[in-house]
Each structure stands twice: as structure tokens, then as C-alpha cells.
Image: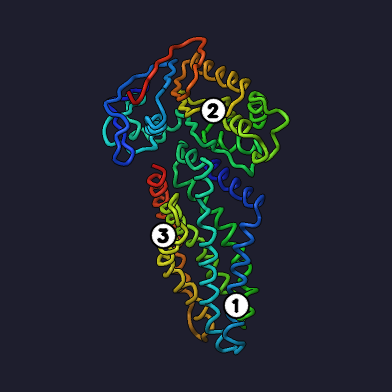
């Protein structure tokens, strides 16, 4: 059963490696959006520290969503999605593999870049570490929830905009607690653990429910 | 083995066919014909379980396919209008993914053998985007060589193929039917069978 999971995961990663521009555009989008704010609001340390966590998180949400549109669309166009639907393996497992590949290709690089872009906002080292941790827990949730939207809008004209309208509201809790954790880490004596615990709870919830919902949406979209 | 009872399919508001019943036993080929738009592809997709049926029943080994679920999908191979291959992957990689998804236990040598069978020796490690339409189709059809599924559902498998490939595919289908397999296909040409029986179904009359 896991051989199918690995097969789809490796396939998506190989495909992305052969078409690096798709991965790179997401990363550069993230870098540019994050870098625009210090240029626009000035270099005052206090302002930047207040803005930093929120801006970096919002940029991560948008960057993660950029790649979502292609998550199932490419497979849909060349007929491989049909084959995936017709395998004798649980569809949610295959969907999970696709979400995992999406996260490895878009989420994980963002996590690695976050400390670097955080420096532009004069965030202290503790806050940078918290940024990495919160993104590490939060970005997989984005990939998993995003999968539902990508499956629902499959094959629709103007699906990209609709996808944003469907998915961005669902990202709000992750944004609130993810950016919250970083902000709180800059306050003395404040505890970030509840924020991380809630993020982890979202992740567990998304891991269990999102693949099932995505599978159901795919079956409807392909009818 | 495959029984269809009073099947009715719609596309939007239009009724494509209704009260369609047939029954296929081992070693049978069902040749579905009909003009464009008569619902051939819809029928095949319904047989795969890709479409929700409003009325009628499709039974495999006596059980409804929607309740069989994965057990039915294990016994069935569908080849649709789209080739289902990735243009950035080469022939071997595409076939490896396809056989893993089909659940056929194959080793690396089988993949090379299957592609050679389809007349693609020397083209195995080229990305399929540089291949011609016919060669792409051959890569996609190489799944059939390695398939262990008793039921093949093939939608226009002969289109875009040259004469050699048509013979190859005809041979594969004949072999599968002779070995007791079932084939449901749509095509506008005749399929020569060495053994087994052909049933014909004409849609849209």
C-alpha cells in the first residue's frame, strides 16, 4: 500500500525537479512580497517588528496557494488523474502523497527561507526560531486544506480566483495562531506553547480529514 | 462475469441511452459502436465506475461494482481518450508509475520488455514529450502487456496508431481474450480474434 504512496510522491518530486521554474516562481514570489514591506513602510525597528510575523505568514499563505492550482490540474489534463482514481488503493492515501509532495516543494523551502527574510524585519533570534517552528507545523496544514479547494475547482474556468476565495478563509486560523506564536515569542514571560499546540491540533485534524474530503471532491469533479 | 442491467446514462439533460442490458462471460470481447455523441465514452466511464448512475445496475462477478469498490478496480484496467502519461517523464518512468498504480507486481526488466514489445526499443529513456502522438500512445498501451487485470476497458485504443501498432494491439487483445479475459472497447475498425467470441453493441439507434 505504501509503495503507491511512495510512487506518487517520487513522481511529483521528479516532475518538479524537471520543471524547476514552477518551484522557483513560488519561492521568489515569497521573497519579493516579504521584501516589499520594509521598502514601503520604512526601516523603523519597532514598526517592522510588529509587522514582521504577520507579513511573513501572509506571504507564505499566498505563495503556498500559487502552486495549488496546478496540484491536480496537470494530472487532470493528461489523464493521469483518471488512472489515480481507478487504482485499487485508498484514494485518500494517494491524495495525501500529492499533498506531501506539494508541501516538500513549496512549504519546506519557505520554512528554510523564513529566518533569512525575517532578518529584514529585525526580528530577534528567538522570534526567528519560533517563525521556523510555527511555519514547520503550519505549512503542511496549508497544503492539506488547499488540496480540497484544488479538487473542488478542478476543470472550472477561472478556477484560480475561485480557489483563493474558497481556501483563504480556511487559512485564517492557521494565520492567527502561526503569526501569533511569533509575536508572543517577542514578549518576555509570555508562553508560546498554547499557540504551537493549537497549530499542531490543526495539523492533526487536517491530516485525518482533508485527504478524505479531497478524495470525495475529486470523484465529483471527474464525473 | 460482467452484467449490465437496464442501464441509463445522461449527460446534462440529454438522455444518451436507456434500458441497456448485456452480459459478458469469460473470453468475450464487446465491441461498442455508434456515431459521435452516441454515448460510447459515457458507457465506458460508467462501466469503470467513474460516473454516478441514476438507474440501472452494473455487476461484476454477481456483485454491484459500487459496493465492490477497490476489489473491482483491482480487476479492471481502463484506457481512456487521454493517454495518462506524463510528458516530462520517460517511457520507463511512466510505465513504472502506471504498473504501480495498477498493482501489477513487476520488476525493472519487465518494464523494458514491455516497451520493447510495443516497438519502442531505443526510445525508453526519452521524455515522452519528444515522442510522436503514436509513440506516446504506444507508451501508454505498454501497460496492457504487463496487466494482470481480467477486464480491459479501452476507449478508442486504435486511434493515432500506425499499421504495425494496430497489429500489435490487436494481438494483445486477442491474446487477452483467448486467455479468458474480457475486453470492452470502442473502435471504428474490426478486431481480429483468434479465439473467444465477439459481441457487438450499437448505440444510438
User: Can marks 1 and 3 be said to lie on one chain?
Assistant: yes
Quick one: which residue is furthest to the right in this view?
B122
Q: CA distance from mark 2 to mark 3?
A: 46 Å
Q: CA distance from mark 1 to mark 3?
A: 34 Å
- Residue B191 at x, y = what percent? 50, 16
Do the numbered discs 2 and 1 sit on residues whose CB atoms are within 8 Å?
no
Quick one: which residue is furthest to the top in this view?
B195
- Residue B195 at x, y = what percent? 49, 10
Q: Of the residues tagged 2 and 1, which is closer to the observer?
A: 2
Chain letter for mark 2, please.
B
Q: Residues within 10 Å of mark 3 (few under 14, many from 20)?
A: few
Q: Is residue B90 visible?
A: yes
Q: Give the residue at x 65% y 52%.
A: A19
* Quadrant into which the C terminus of chain A falls: top left
Q: Is residue B72 visible?
A: no
Query: Which residue is disc 1 drawn over?
Result: A36
SS class of the residue under badge 2? loop
Q: Of the residues tagged 2 and 3, which is closer to the observer?
A: 2
Q: CA distance from mark 2 to mark 1?
A: 53 Å
Query: Which residue is disc 2 drawn over?
Result: B159
Q: Is residue B118 above or below residue A90?
A: above
State the mark number for residue B191.
Answer: none
Query: Which residue is disc 3 drawn over?
Result: A205
Q: Residues within 10 Å of mark 1 (few under 14, many from 20)?
A: few
Chain letter for mark 3, please.
A
- Judging depth in this view, the residue of B13 and A172 nearest the camera is B13
Amino acid at each position: 500500500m505504501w509503495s503507491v504512496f511512495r510512487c506518487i510522491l517520487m513522481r511529483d518530486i521528479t516532475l518538479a525537479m524537471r520543471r524547476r521554474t514552477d518551484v522557483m516562481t513560488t519561492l521568489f514570489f515569497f521573497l519579493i512580497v516579504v521584501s516589499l514591506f520594509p521598502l514601503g513602510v520604512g526601516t523603523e525597528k519597532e514598526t517592522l517588528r510588529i509587522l514582521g510575523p504577520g507579513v511573513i505568514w501572509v506571504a507564505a499563505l499566498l505563495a503556498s496557494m500559487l502552486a495549488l492550482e496546478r496540484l491536480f490540474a496537470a494530472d487532470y489534463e493528461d489523464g493521469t488523474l483518471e488512472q489515480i482514481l481507478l487504482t485499487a488503493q485508498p484514494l485518500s492515501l494517494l491524495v495525501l502523497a500529492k499533498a506531501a509532495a506539494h508541501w516538500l516543494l513549496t512549504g519546506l523551502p519557505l520554512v528554510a527561507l523564513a529566518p533569512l527574510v525575517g532578518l529584514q524585519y529585525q526580528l530577534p533570534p528567538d522570534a526567528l526560531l519560533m517563525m521556523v517552528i510555527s511555519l514547520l507545523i503550519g505549512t503542511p496544514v496549508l497544503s492539506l486544506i488547499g488540496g480540497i479547494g484544488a479538487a473542488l475547482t478542478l476543470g472550472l474556468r477561472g478556477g484560480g480566483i475561485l480557489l483563493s476565495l474558497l481556501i483563504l478563509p480556511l487559512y485564517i486560523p492557521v494565520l492567527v495562531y502561526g503569526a501569533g506564536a511569533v509575536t508572543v515569542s517577542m514578549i518576555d514571560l509570555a508562553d508560546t506553547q498554547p499557540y504551537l499546540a493549537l497549530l499542531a491540533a490543526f495539523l492533526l485534524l487536517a491530516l485525518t480529514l482533508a485527504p478524505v474530503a479531497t478524495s470525495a471532491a475529486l470523484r465529483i469533479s471527474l464525473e | 462475469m460482467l452484467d449490465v442491467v437496464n442501464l441509463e446514462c445522461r449527460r446534462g439533460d440529454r438522455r444518451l441511452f436507456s434500458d441497456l442490458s448485456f452480459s459478458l462471460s469469460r473470453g468475450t470481447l464487446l465491441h461498442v459502436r455508434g456515431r459521435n455523441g452516441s454515448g460510447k465514452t459515457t458507457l465506458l466511464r460508467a462501466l469503470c465506475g467513474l460516473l454516478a448512475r441514476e438507474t440501472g445496475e452494473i455487476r461484476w462477478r454477481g456483485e454491484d461494482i459500487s459496493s465492490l469498490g477497490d476489489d473491482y478496480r483491482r480487476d479492471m484496467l481502463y484506457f481512456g481518450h487521454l493517454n495518462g502519461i506524463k510528458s516530462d517523464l520517460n517511457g520507463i518512468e511512466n510505465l513504472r508509475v502506471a504498473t504501480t498504480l495498477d498493482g501489477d507486481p513487476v520488476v525493472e526488466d519487465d518494464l523494458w520488455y514491455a516497451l520493447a514489445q510495443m516497438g519502442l526499443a531505443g526510445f525508453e529513456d526519452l521524455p515522452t514529450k519528444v515522442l510522436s502522438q503514436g509513440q506516446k500512445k504506444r507508451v501508454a498501451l505498454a501497460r496492457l502487456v504487463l496487466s494482470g487485470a481480467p477486464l480491459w476497458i479501452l476507449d478508442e485504443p486504435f486511434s493515432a496508431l500506425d499499421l504495425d501498432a494496430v497489429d500489435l494491439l490487436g494481438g494483445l487483445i486477442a491474446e487477452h481474450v483467448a486467455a479468458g479475459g474480457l475486453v470492452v472497447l470502442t473502435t471504428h475498425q474490426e478486431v481480429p480474434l483468434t479465439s473467444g467470441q465477439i459481441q457487438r453493441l450499437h448505440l444510438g439507434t
